[in-house]
Amino acid sequence: DIILGVLALQGAFKEHLEYFQKVIEGNPEQYSKYNFKFIEVRTPEELEQCDSLVIPGGESTSISLIAERTQMLQPLLDFVKDESKSVWGTCAGLIFLSKQLKNGKVGQKLLGALNVQVVRNAFGRQVNSFESHLDFSSFIKDCHDFPAVFIRAPVIDEILDQDNINNSINDPTITKSSNNYNNKSPVKVLYSLDNFDNNNNHLIVAVRQGRKLGTSFHPELATKDYRFHKWFIDEFVLGSDRYI
Ligand code: GLN
């Protein structure tokens, strides 16, 4: 069995499970030799069974708090350290997976598996929520028009220096992960919104680092479009190291 878990403490976990199921149902021949199981993850025992994990969107402060209260924080910190495990964070999940955070709440915890700095609610002033058709064909074959849904979304505003993660200046407005782990794979920017709002900016909204993936937007809310979930299964869950 290949067990793909979706962290079900809070947020949009049901949608992810449904989308993965659709990918398998829609491509029976391609996946007939695998026995996929998609499960909701709420306990350390459930997490332990997983080969891969998705951390959904929702509220990153709530997810962090509930993880602590349910004794899930340490198991999650350990899980993401394992380089053979694929982990994908969407929106609040991206925040939770990152090393550093601007606009974090006091006490908010970060898993520290992606060497990036994230800013919460980065589109807050301009637009809270919007959908944009984005060209992902540089990393997903023929995917030229993916309907990306952004809901009070974060962006990545800095890729952190691989070797100097823990030496960066001590800025009290920045929340840092306590995970004593440094993902050694290179951070690869998959997509950035350039010139958003006619500002000369580059808002990074999708990155991968080894088998860890982070997206600001919600592919599980792209109406009947399962391409992103299929790509995650093919590239991360089944993918071999040659892609990394
Ligand atoms: N703004 C939320 C947070 O900071 C994320 C929103 C989302 O996941 N759609 O956690």
Image: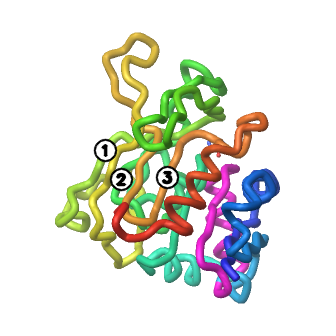
Q: What residue type is labelled 1?
A: Glu
**Badge 3, how many Cα within 10 Å: few under 14, some, many 20+?**
many
Disc 3 is placed on an element classified as strand
**Badge 1, how many Cα within 10 Å: few under 14, some, many 20+?**
some
Report which quarter residue 18 is drawn in.
bottom right
Q: Which amino acid does label 3 sit on?
A: Gly
Mark 1 lies on residue = 158
Residue 121, x across and y down, in percent: 55, 36
Looking at the picture, tell me which residue is in the foreground, 204 or 145: 145
Q: Give the range drawn in magenta.
A: 48-70
Does residue 64 belong to the magenta stretch?
A: yes
Report which quarter residue 169 is drawn in.
bottom left
Answer above or below: position of 40 versus 140: below
* Sequence-first disc among 3 and 2: 2
Which image quarter is the C terminus in?
bottom left
- Pointer 3 with pointer 1, Cβ within 8 A: no
Which label lies toward us, 3 or 2? 3
Residue 85, x across and y down, in percent: 50, 75
Q: In this view, does 41 lie to the left or right of 136?
A: right
Mark 2 lies on residue = 116
- Pointer 2 with pointer 1, Cβ within 8 A: yes
* Sequence-first disc among 3 and 1: 1
- Pointer 3 with pointer 2, Cβ within 8 A: yes
Residue at left offset 64%, top offset 51%: 229
Disc 2 is placed on an element classified as strand
Mark 3 lies on residue = 214
Residue at left offset 52%, top offset 34%: 142
